Image (cartoon, helix red, strand yellow):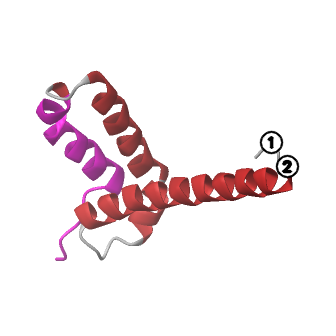
């Protein structure tokens, strides 16, 4: 008989539980970042389920990296828009 895998969502919950003491030791602003990171893992549960052949921790960490990359791209786009606006200002204002 083949080995059955626990549901990916349960693996994420277990991962979060194992990090509970770590979270408690964080400063308030770091706890906020930690919580957002855990939410990013949960946003990609479907992809983690679909990719059940990879290590669940790798899938979770990659989900977090994906969310960080998306945020970075949004910030870069916003910076570009602001730079374009600045470029259109009269020279005596910039």
Residue that appears at 87% across and 49% down: 90
Contact check, label 1 and label 2, Cβ < 8 Å: yes
| Residue 65 circle label | none
| Neighbourhood count class around disc 2 (C-alpha, 10 Å): few under 14, some 14–19, many 20 upward | few
| Residue placed most toward the observer, 47 or 84 | 84
Using the numbered discs, state the Cα–Cα distance from disc 1 to disc 2 in whole angstroms. Answer: 6 Å
Q: Position of residue 17 (x, y in %)?
A: 19, 37
The reply to whether the magenta stretch includes residue 85 is no
| Residue that appears at 45% across and 62% down | 66
- Name which residue lies at 37% across and 44% down: 37
Please identify the quarter of the rendering in which residue 36 is found: top left
Residue 81's x, y, as percent?
A: 74, 55
Tell me where the magenta segment starts and ends, as one range: 1-23
The rendered magenta stretch, by its main secondary structure, is classed as helix
Where is mark 1, residue-wise? Answer: 93
Left or right? Give the position of 45 relative to 56: right
Q: Which residue is mark 2?
A: 89
Q: Which quadrant of the figure contains the N terminus?
A: bottom left
The answer to whether 25 appears left or right of 70 in the picture is left
SS state under label 2: loop
Tell which of 80 and 20 is nearer to you: 80
Q: Is residue 73 visible?
A: yes
């Amino acid at each position: 008989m083949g080995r059955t895998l626990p549901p990916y969502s349960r693996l994420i919950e277990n991962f979060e539980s194992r990090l509970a003491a770590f979270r408690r030791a964080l400063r308030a602003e770091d706890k906020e970042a930690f919580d957002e990171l855990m939410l990013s893992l949960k946003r990609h549960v479907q992809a983690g389920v679909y990719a059940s052949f990879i290590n669940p921790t790798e899938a979770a960490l990659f989900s977090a990296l994906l969310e960080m990359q998306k945020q970075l791209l949004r910030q870069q786009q916003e910076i570009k828009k602001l730079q374009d606006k600045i470029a259109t200002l009269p020279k005596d204002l910039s």
